[in-house]
Amino acid sequence: QVQLVESGGGVVQPGRSLRLSCAASGFTFSSYGMHWVRQAPGKGLEWVAVIWYDGFFKHYADSVKGRFTISRDNTKNTLYLQMNSLRPEDTAVYYCARDPDYEYWGQGTLVTVSS
Amino acid sequence: DVQMTQSPSSLSASVGDRVTITCRASQDIRNDLGWFQQKPGKAPKRLIYAASSLQSGVPSRFSGSRSGTEFTLTISSLQPEDFATYYCLQHNTYRHTFGQGTKLEIK
């Protein structure tokens, strides 16, 4: 069965960096685009970024553009989100989800940006 | 970017009620819309895809429809397990957008 498992969350100081991972299994990872979606505490869902199946195209929300980088390693069936220059407003649970149509989601990993 | 305006933001209803949630897109997004249910501490769960297709395993009391740029999620007869927060999501453009969410509470 399809599984997406995020990791890498934690507490980090403002201005520092963190890299999230999403390990995929149960499907041909290299055939699907992948997304990151986040949810701040008590708030709604916010789309963050997408990467196409081959890694060639990437798109970002304005709120993270220039600070976050989405990437993937199809040999390791893993999706990444490199988060630099973190701000308190980046505090959220971060989910990975499979394209198209977001049928499958991971369980999420919590990132807390605080001094 | 496409804006998704979801209403209402909250809704109180009783078991057995018929409930409707609406999302309006700021431009034509064809049928590139999904509906998701989220319960506290859990990942979102897809209910409807392509505006009106029911996700496998989701009860038939859930349905979706489209009229132009207006999309509707209907729950025909609320069950206790349906009290949750619901989101629409458009994926027509490169940058996707969620509606603001509708919290469905027990009256």
Image (tube, helix red, strand yellow):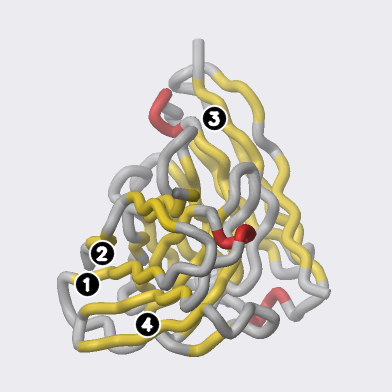
- N-terminal-most mark, 4 or 1: 1
Q: Residue lying furthest top in this view?
A: A115
Residue nearest the observer in this picture, A59 or A91: A91
Image quarter (top left, top right, bottom left or bottom right) of the N terminus of chain A: bottom right
Task: Say whether marks 1 and 2 touch (CB < 8 Å).
Answer: yes
Question: What amino acid type should be assigned to the residue bearing mark 3?
Answer: Ser
Left or right: residue A55 versus residue B23 is right
* Residue B1 visible to an observer of this rendering: no
Q: Are marks 4 and 1 on the same chain?
A: yes
SS for tag 3?
A: loop
Q: Are marks 3 and 1 on the same chain?
A: no
Q: Which residue is mark 4?
A: B32
Q: Which residue is mark 1?
A: B25
User: Gap between marks 1 and 2, in whole Å?
Assistant: 5 Å
Q: Quadrant of residue B24?
A: bottom left
Q: Are marks 1 and 2 on the same chain?
A: yes
Residue nearest the observer in this picture, A83 or B98: B98
- N-terminal-most mark, 1 or 2: 2
Residue nearest the observer in this picture, A6 or A16: A6
> Dot 3, how many residues are within 10 Å of its Cα: few (below 14), some (14-19), or many (20+)?
some
Q: Residue at x 77, y 65 (%)?
A: A3
SS for tag 2?
A: strand
Q: Residue at x 38, y 55 (%)?
A: B102
Q: Residue at x 50, y 10 (%)?
A: A115
User: Gap between marks 4 and 3, in whole Å?
Assistant: 34 Å
User: Gap between marks 3 and 1, in whole Å?
Assistant: 35 Å
Q: Which mark is residue B4?
A: 2
Q: Which mark is residue A17?
A: 3
Question: What amino acid type should be assigned to the residue bearing mark 2?
Answer: Met
Where does the image place residue A79, in percent across and percent down from the top left? 65, 58
Question: What amino acid type should be assigned to the residue bearing mark 1?
Answer: Ala
